[in-house]
Amino acid sequence: MKFFVDTADVKEIRELNDIGLVDGVTTNPSLIMKSGRDITEVTKEICDMIDGPVSAEVTATDFEGMIKEGKVLAKIADNICIKLPLTLEGLKACKALTSEGYKTNVTLCFSANQALLAAKAGATFISPFLGRLDDIGLNGMELIGEIRTIYDNYGFQTEILAASIRTVNHVKEAALIGADVATVPPAVLKALVKHPLTDKGLDAFLADWAKTGQKIA
C-alpha cells in the first residue's frame, strides 16, 4: 500500500518524507485554508519536496471552470494530480483532462456506483471517504471492498485511494481489503508505529543493557 499524506503542512510532510513514508500528498481547499498560505506557493513547495503525485483541488463546479482551474494547477509542477468532485460535470472534466494526459483524483466518493463511473471516466485515483460514512452509521470499509471487487472484475486501472481516514484501524482494514493507497493525516501515520509492547520491550532491553556497564561506541 502507498501512503499519501493528507495535509498542506510542509513541516509535517518533510518530517515524514525524511523517514521514507511518503508516496504522495493530498490537499483540498480546507487544508490550504488551515495552512494559511497561498495555494500556488505552498503547493509548489510540496511538489518540489515529493516525487509522487500531489493532489490539488479545483474549486469550480462547472465543466469549463474545472478545466481552466485544473490546467492552471497542473502548471505548478509535473507531479500535480488534479482533484475533481464526483459530479457529472466533474466526471466530464475528468474524461477531458485524462484524455490530455493529466493525472486526476476524483474525490468525495460515497458509493460503488460513483466509483464505477469515475473509472469509466478514466480517473487516475478514486477517493472513497471512509470516515464520513462511518460518521452517519455506515461502514466505509464495505465501500472499499465493493470498489475493489468491481475494479478487479473489469480490469479498471483507477487506483483506490482510501480517504477520510481517522484511525490506525482504518489503515489496516483498508490494506487488508486491497486499497491501493491510503491518504492519512500526519498524526495517524505516525501512530502506526506505536504499540505498548514495543515500548515495554525497549525499556526492558535498555534497563538490562545499563546493568552491563558496556558501551557500543
Image: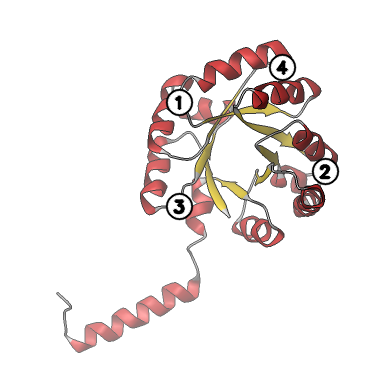
Residues under labels 3 and 2: Cα distance?
Answer: 29 Å
Circle 2 — which element? helix
- The answer to whether 173 appears left or right of 36 in the picture is right
Which mark, by number, is residue 21? Answer: 3
Q: Amino acid at mark 1?
A: Ala
73 versus 7 height, above or below: above
**Foreground tag (2 vs 4):** 2
Check whether the beta carbons of the residues at disc 3 and disc 2 lie within 8 A of each other.
no
| Residue drawn at (59%, 15%) of the image | 69
**Is 147 left, or right, of 184 in this rendering?**
right
Disc 3 or 2, which lies upstream in sequence?
Answer: 3
Circles 1 and 3, Cβ within 8 Å, touching? The answer is: no
Labels 1 and 4: the sequence-earlier one: 4
Instruction: State the separation of the CA atoms marked 2 and 4.
Output: 22 Å
Mark 2 residue type: Ala
Helix, strand or loop at mark 3: loop
Task: Name the residue that disc number 4 marks.
Answer: 61
Q: Residue at x 50, y 41 (%)?
A: 24
Q: Are marks 3 and 4 in contact (CB under 8 Å)?
A: no
